């Protein structure tokens, strides 16, 4: 890991802003990995540590070792798991920002502690910025979610019919 960080820092920057632990090694406790990343923070090679696709339990354990600033999670109209599996609650309690990837809803599901990953194309980036200005009432949000649930059920039913044979 240290060699990789040295290679990434040179020649572009002196420090990595946010280093995500993406794929957890099942043979290494996550606390050990974060402890190693914390050494890189202490050395000034990394500013902040983030996790990707972690559970609420893992996040709570890791935050006891070193502060985590961001969690990268899929969050879209089709994938709302973080609202019910405890990760959103844990992030709010611990002051960790959720970085949503694949936000198919173009801003429908953003909030105070959720940031969507911007894209490089200017037009889409401008649309994402404008989408952040949209504020739905609880009724509008509920109506959209109900429609998405129906759409998801229709798609699943259609897929069953296609792959039945």
Image: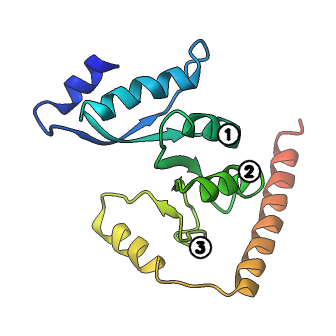
* Mark sitting earlier along the chain (1/3): 1
User: Does residue 154 appear anywhere in the picture?
Assistant: yes
Q: Which mark is residue 156?
A: none
**In the image: residue 126, left or right of residue 45:** right
- List the single residue furthest toward the left: 11
Q: Residue at x 68, y 43 (%)?
A: 56
Q: Is residue 55 above or below residue 134?
A: above
The residue pinned by badge 2 equals 86
* Mark sitting earlier along the chain (1/2): 1
The residue pinned by badge 1 equals 55
The residue pinned by badge 3 equals 108
Foreground residue among 7 and 14: 14
Element under disc 1? loop
Label 1, label 2: how far apart the Cα atoms are: 8 Å
Is the residue under label 2 in contact with that under label 1 (CB below 8 Å)? yes
Numbered disc in front, either 3 or 2: 2
User: Residue 111, image x and y in percent?
Assistant: 56, 71
Q: Is residue 101 above or below residue 144?
A: above
Element under disc 3? loop
User: Residue 123, image x and y in percent?
Assistant: 32, 71
Q: Quadrant of residue 75?
A: bottom right
Quarter holding the N terminus is top left
């Amino acid at each position: 890991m240290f060699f990789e960080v040295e290679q990434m820092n040179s020649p572009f920057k002196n420090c990595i802003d946010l280093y995500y632990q993406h794929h957890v090694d099942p043979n290494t406790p996550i606390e050990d990995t974060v402890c190693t990343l914390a050494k890189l923070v202490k050395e000034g090679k990394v500013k902040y540590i983030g996790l990707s696709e972690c559970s609420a339990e893992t996040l709570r354990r890791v935050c006891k070792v070193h502060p985590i600033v961001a969690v990268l999670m899929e969050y879209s109209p089709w994938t709302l798991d973080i609202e019910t599996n405890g990760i959103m609650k844990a992030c709010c309690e611990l002051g960790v920002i959720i970085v949503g990837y694949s936000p198919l809803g173009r801003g429908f599901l953003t909030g105070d502690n959720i940031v969507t990953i911007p894209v490089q194309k200017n037009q889409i980036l401008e649309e994402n910025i404008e989408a952040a200005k949209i504020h739905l009432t609880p009724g509008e949000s509920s109506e959209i979610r109900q429609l998405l649930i129906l759409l998801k059920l229709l798609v699943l039913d259609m897929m069953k019919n296609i792959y039945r044979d």
